[in-house]
């Protein structure tokens, strides 16, 4: 007969015991709205597993996005198009477990993958339920005005939604590559119209990816009920997001212009993932990242 063991203590995990008391208040939608209203920058990073999520939470990152960028950084795919709902469910659950084991303060956003919300709003609801039941607090979906009806349908059913405009990686083949969107008067007007339609439909957050800095700053002022989160969209947005592996300098290809490697410049003796995340939070909060002349268009 084997003797009973304490299964919560393992030599492998670096996570704290699940009973660790929280010292910070969990991030909620009202708190995010308050930050937006007071001009306090919102910080977001992607994470795909329990440990990185727990470290990001401990470093003070307010929002964690289980992005379908995991197709590239975890699965080695060449785009996000091949990521499935089951894969997103699995990683969302891993991240939610990690957050529960740490301070559990971060707001958790699950990315709806390509094909999981395109058929109908009912299909989108079924997919969103999968991610919410895996532990997400909010779901993100890509696309312009055509998604507004879906956003409204989800929000009316109590599912907070983050929209995503500009460069939408799931449609990279239709866009003809990873390039800046909303350049020129007509494209800017279309992007603005879509942004307002999505806010009116109830989107509480909106990722703006590779959008000219001036346009995203203007939009940020106009969208008083929807917090803009920029990636390659300049410093004028309500918050910033980066892909975890990029900001840790683990992008083995060409580093996108909008990324800063937060491991760089740190004293080698003290460089740490948590330190890099804390530096990111500080830089976003004090406005020293991003720098428009360097990281934006
Ligand atoms: O999938 C992802 O990581 C994203 C971010 C780039 C915003 O959508």
Image (cartoon, rainbow, N blue to C red):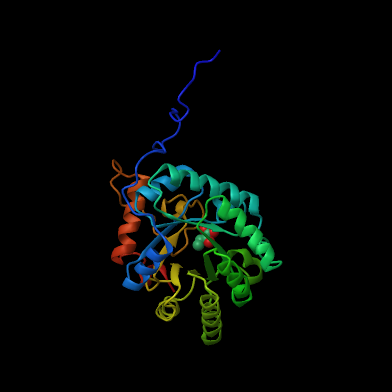
Q: Position of residue 146 (x, y in %)?
A: 64, 75
- Tell me what residue is drawn at x 56 percent, y 59 percent: 111
- Res 248 seen here: yes
Which residue reaches farthest front?
A: 157
Q: Nearer the viewer, residue 214 or 26?
A: 26
**Residue lying farthest top?**
1
**Point 47% across, 62% down: residue:** 256
Instruction: Name the spot of residue 280 as percent of width and height, x first.
Output: 35, 57
In the displayed structure, does residue 290 sit left or right of residue 167? Answer: left
Nearest the camera: 279 or 18?
18
In depth, the one of 256 and 112 nearer the eye is 112
State the count of labels.
0
Image quadrant for the C terminus? bottom left
Q: Quadrant of the N terminus?
A: top right
Instruction: Tell me if I can see residue 264 in this picture.
Output: no
Is the residue 135 above or below the residue 180 in the image? above
Q: Check the image and report above or below for 259 versus 297.
A: above
Q: Observer-nearest residue: 255 or 17?
A: 17
Decide: is 20 above or below 31.
Answer: above
Residue 105 horizontal/vertical position (percent): 39, 52
Q: Is residue 235 left or right of residue 66?
A: left
Q: Which residue is rendered at x = 52% and y = 64% of the image?
A: 160
Residue 122 x, y percent position in the rendering: 68, 65
Identified at 34% across, 57% down, the residue is 281
Residue farthest bottom in this picture? 185
């Amino acid at each position: 007969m084997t003797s009973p063991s304490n299964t919560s203590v393992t030599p492998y995990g670096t996570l704290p015991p699940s009973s660790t008391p929280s010292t910070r208040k969990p991030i909620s939608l009202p708190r995010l709205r308050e930050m937006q209203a007071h001009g306090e920058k919102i910080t977001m990073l992607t994470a795909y597993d329990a440990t990185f999520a727990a470290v990001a939470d401990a470093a003070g990152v307010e929002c964690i996005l289980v992005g379908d960028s995991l197709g590239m950084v975890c699965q080695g795919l060449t785009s996000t198009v091949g990521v499935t709902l089951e894969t997103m469910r699995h990683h969302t659950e891993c991240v939610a477990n990690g957050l529960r084991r740490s301070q559990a303060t971060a707001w958790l956003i699950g990315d709806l993958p390509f094909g999981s919300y395109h058929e109908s709003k009912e299909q989108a609801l079924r997919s969103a339920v999968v991610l919410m039941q895996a532990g997400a607090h909010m779901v993100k979906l890509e696309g312009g005005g055509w998604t507004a009806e879906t956003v409204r349908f989800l929000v009316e059913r109590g599912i907070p939604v983050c929209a995503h405009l500009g460069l939408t990686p799931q449609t990279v083949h239709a866009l003809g590559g990873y390039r800046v969107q909303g350049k020129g008067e007509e494209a800017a007007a279309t992007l603005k119209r879509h942004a307002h339609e999505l806010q009116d439909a109830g989107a509480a957050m909106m990722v703006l990816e590779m959008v000219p800095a001036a346009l995203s700053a203007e939009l940020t002022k106009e969208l008083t009920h929807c917090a803009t989160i920029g990636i390659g969209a300049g410093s004028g947005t309500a918050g910033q997001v980066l892909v975890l592996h990029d900001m840790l300098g683990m992008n083995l290809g060409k580093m996108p212009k909008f990324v800063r490697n937060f491991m760089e410049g740190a004293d080698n003796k003290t460089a740490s993932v948590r330190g890099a995340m804390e530096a990111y939070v500080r830089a976003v909060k004090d406005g020293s990242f991003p720098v428009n002349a360097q990281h934006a268009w």
